[in-house]
Image: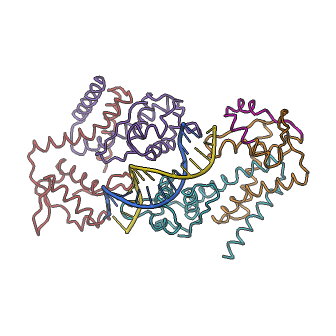
Chain colours: A cyan, B orange, C purple, D red, E yellow, F blue
Amino acid sequence: MDLIHLDNHSGVPIFRQIQDQIRQQILAGRLATGAQLSPVRDLAIQIRVNPMTVSKAYALLEAEGLLERRRGVGLFVAPLAPRQRDRDCRALLAEALGAAAASAVQMGIAEDEAMAIYRDLMREYSRRRDQR
Amino acid sequence: MDLIHLDNHSGVPIFRQIQDQIRQQILAGRLATGAQLSPVRDLAIQIRVNPMTVSKAYALLEAEGLLERRRGVGLFVAPLAPRQRDRDCRALLAEALGAAAASAVQMGIAEDEAMAIYRDLMREYSRRRDQR
Amino acid sequence: MDLIHLDNHSGVPIFRQIQDQIRQQILAGRLATGAQLSPVRDLAIQIRVNPMTVSKAYALLEAEGLLERRRGVGLFVAPLAPRQRDRDCRALLAEALGAAAASAVQMGIAEDEAMAIYRDLMREYSRRRDQR
Amino acid sequence: MDLIHLDNHSGVPIFRQIQDQIRQQILAGRLATGAQLSPVRDLAIQIRVNPMTVSKAYALLEAEGLLERRRGVGLFVAPLAPRQRDRDCRALLAEALGAAAASAVQMGIAEDEAMAIYRDLMREYSRRRDQR
DNA sequence: GTGGTCTAGACCACA
DNA sequence: GTGGTCTAGACCACT
C-alpha cells in the first residue's frame, strides 16, 4: 500500500483525504483485489493521526463497497469487476472535471484552449510521477 | 446579475458558492466593470440565505480586488485590465483542472480519453446554457 | 420528537439504537417532513450520551437520505414522497421478518401457527402502547 | 449435518451464526438425537473459519444443553423431550418475531398486511428450500 | 492480533 | 447558535 500524503492546510478533512487516496489506489489497481490494508493502528502511527480518523476513512470505503471487513482479521480490498472498475474510474474523473467544464464555458474560454490547459497539466503530473 | 444557484448537498460553504459564482460572472464579463451588485438584503432574500452570508461573500470578493465598495452607495464591479482578466480566467481554470489531471494520471486513463471526457462535459454545459 | 430509549445491555451499539428509533419515528410519520431534530448537544444531554455518538447516528440517517443538513442551522427531516415512505416501511418490516420466516420454515412450524404467534405479539405491543 | 452458510456482511458474529444454524437443525429434527457432529477441525476447514470459532459455537450449544460432549469421542446431539423441543421452537420463533411485531405496530402497518407479508416470506423460503 | 465503540473535551467553520 | 472534526485513551468483541 502506497504512502498516504496529508495536507493539513487544504481544509479537506483528514479522514476524507485518506479515503480519497485509498479509493484512487484501488481504482488505479495499485491496491489489488483481496489485498489486505494496513491495520488501523499501523496506518495511524505511520501518518501520525488518531486511529479513529483512519477507522472512519476505512468505514466509509466499506460503505462504498470498495473494502470488505473480515471480523477479527482485517480489512481487504473487495472484489470488483474490471468493467465496474473502469466505470467507477470514469465516473470519478467526470465528477472531478465537472466544475472545470462549467468554469471554462462560463468564462468563455475556447474548447481547444481549455483542453490544451488540461493536457499540459496531465503531462506535468505524469512527468513529476515518472521522476519519482 | 445572473441568478445564484445554491447546492446544499455539495459540502461547499454557501458563502463560497456565492463568491465563486459572482467571481465567474465578473471574469466572464456578464457583470461588467462598474455595474452595481444587488444589495446584500435583496440578494439574501432572493436566494433565501442569511444576510451575513451574502455579506461575507461580498467582503471576500472585495478583498480579492474584484469589487469596490462606495460607502453609502453600494458595491460595484472594480475595473479590471483585460489582460489581468484573461490571466485570472486561466489561473482559475487551471486550478479547477489540477485535481482532475492528477486523477486521470493516477488512474491510468489515457490522455486522449481524459480530454475527450472533458470536451464532452464542456459541450454538455454549453448546450444546456444555450437552451436557457 | 419522541424520547429515545436506550438499552445498554442489548449489545446493539448506542448510535444504532438512536438511528433505528429516529428512522422509525420518521417512517411512522411522528417526525414530519421539515421538522427540525433536537440539536446534537441537547439530545446528547437528554439521553446521557456523548455528543459524538448522537452525531454519528444523525450522519448515518443523512446518508440514508432521511435527514437534511442546513449548515449552521440544524438537521431537518428530508422530504419523502408518501409512496416512498410506504415502500420504505414495508422494506423495513420485510427485513425484520426475514429471519423469522426462515426460522419458522426450518423448524417445521406450520404457517398458520407462525402467523398466529406473530399476530399475538403485535396485539401485545399495541396494547402496551395504548396503555401508555 | 447440513451445510453452514455464513454471511460476512450481516454484522452477526460468525460463532453466533454457526451456533444458530446448528441449533435450528437440531430443533427441526434434521440433526437427530444421538447424531455425531462434525469434528471442530473438519467443520472449520469446510466453512473456512478459525477452529476456535467453531469450538466456541459448540461450547455454547453444549452450555444450552443441546449438545453432549463425550471425551475422546466427539460431540453428539443431546436427547431432548419432544415437548421441550416444541417449547424451544416456539420460544425461538417468538424471539425472532418480537422486533418485527414492534416495528409493524410503530409504523402503523395493519395487522392483516403485516401478517400477509410474513406469510409471503415464509412461502418464499419454503419454495426455495424445496427447489434445492 | 484485528476492528468497533464510546468518552471527554477541544477547536473550527458556518449562519 | 448550529454541526463537523480531531485527539487521547479506554474497553469490548471477534478470530
Horizontal side of D114 relative to D25 (left or right) equals right
Farthest residue in the top direction?
A: C130
Nearer the observer, B41 or F9? F9
Nearer the observer, C115 or D102? D102
Horizontal side of A35 relative to A124 (left or right) equals left
Q: Residue at x 67, y 34 (%)?
A: B49
In the image, residue C67 lies at what x, y percent?
A: 51, 37
Q: Is residue B36 magenta?
A: yes
> For the image shown, how many numbered marks are present on the structure?
0
Quadrant of the drawing holding the N terminus of chain C: top left
In the rendered image of this protein, does residue C123 appear above or below residue D99?
A: above
In the image, residue B128 lies at what x, y percent?
A: 76, 41
In the image, residue B5 lies at what x, y percent?
A: 71, 38
User: In which quarter of the view is residue B16 placed?
Assistant: top right
Q: Residue at x 26, y 44 (%)?
A: C103
In the rendered image of this protein, does residue D107 appear above or below residue C19?
A: above
| Residue A105 appears in the picture as rendered | yes
Q: Is residue C25 magenta?
A: no
Q: Please report the bounds of the magenta region as a residue range.
A: B34-57
Horizontal side of B79 relative to C108 (left or right) equals right
In the image, residue A13 lies at what x, y percent?
A: 58, 55
User: In which quarter of the view is residue C25 placed?
Assistant: top left
Nearer the observer, C131 or B130? C131
Quadrant of the drawing holding the C terminus of chain C: top left
Farthest residue in the bottom direction?
A: A131
| Residue A35 appears in the picture as rendered | no
